[in-house]
Amino acid sequence: MFDKNDKDVVSEASADDRSSVEEKIAEIEQMLGTTRDQLLRRTAELENMRRRHQQEREQLTFEANKRLILDLLGIADDLERTIEHASESNDPLAQGIELIYKSFLKTLERYGVRPMQTVDEPFDPMKHDALLEEPRDDVAPGLVTREIQRGYLLNDAILRHAKVFVSKAVE
């Protein structure tokens, strides 16, 4: 059926077909690699976008809570002043206000808010706002001697600086 010339034509055709198929396979493998790379990049971009959105939501929530808590701290200041002025009497109303104040502070603590300790501590401009330097010879210079307005921390970050008097050497 086939003569020698036909066999040469068939072997040439199948060699051409093989190289053509190998080229197509290489082309498809390259396209597959490119598509896989694009898929991995898009997946990473999507994951990064999710993480960014989560962080932005957390930051917005933190800032909203921070503003609310700062407003509430004004109420704590008012309660402190009321207790200070009413402390001389044994008035049941004064005792009730003190109980409300303590309850209010416990509620703030549940949300990560706690007062700073400032008196007899070294002055730290990151925590304190110095209102006055008072000459004192009974304490070392640079110590907080009096607290005018209490400072607060929110989850170990400064929420509000304490307003304080600081000692200095007597001249």
Image (cartoon, rainbow, N blue to C red):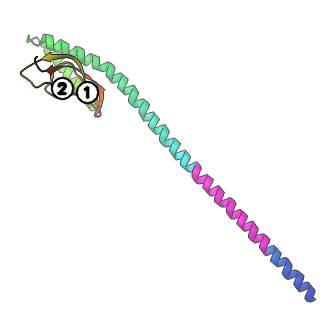
Name the side, left or right, on which 50 lies relative to 161. Answer: right
The residue singled out by tag 1 in the image is: 127
Residue drawn at (30%, 20%), measured in percent from left and top?
A: 72
Name the side, left or right, on which 52 lies relative to 84. Answer: right
The residue singled out by tag 2 in the image is: 118
Q: How crowded is mark 2: few (under 14 residues within 10 Å), some or many (20 or more)?
A: many
- In percent of width and height, residue 75 lies at 27, 16
SS state under label 2: loop
**Quarter of the picture holding the C terminus:** top left
**2 or 1: tag closer to the N-terminus:** 2
Q: Please tell me whether residue 116 is drawn above or below residue 41 in the rendered image.
A: above
Residue situated in front as seen by the camera: 17 or 109: 17
- In percent of width and height, residue 16 lies at 82, 74
Name the side, left or right, on which 159 lies relative to 166. Answer: right
SS state under label 1: loop
Magenta range: 18-41
Q: Please tell me whether residue 21 is drawn above or below residue 65 in the rendered image.
A: below
* Quarter assignment of residue 141: top left
Q: Give, as a three-letter code, the residue at label 1.
A: Lys
The secondary structure making up most of the magenta span is helix
**Quarter of the picture holding the N terminus:** bottom right
Residue drawn at (33%, 19%), measured in percent from left and top?
A: 71
Indicate yes or no whether the magenta region holds residue 115. Answer: no
Indicate yes or no whether the magenta region holds residue 38. Answer: yes
Residue drawn at (69%, 59%), measured in percent from left and top?
A: 31
Residue situated in front as seen by the camera: 91 or 146: 146
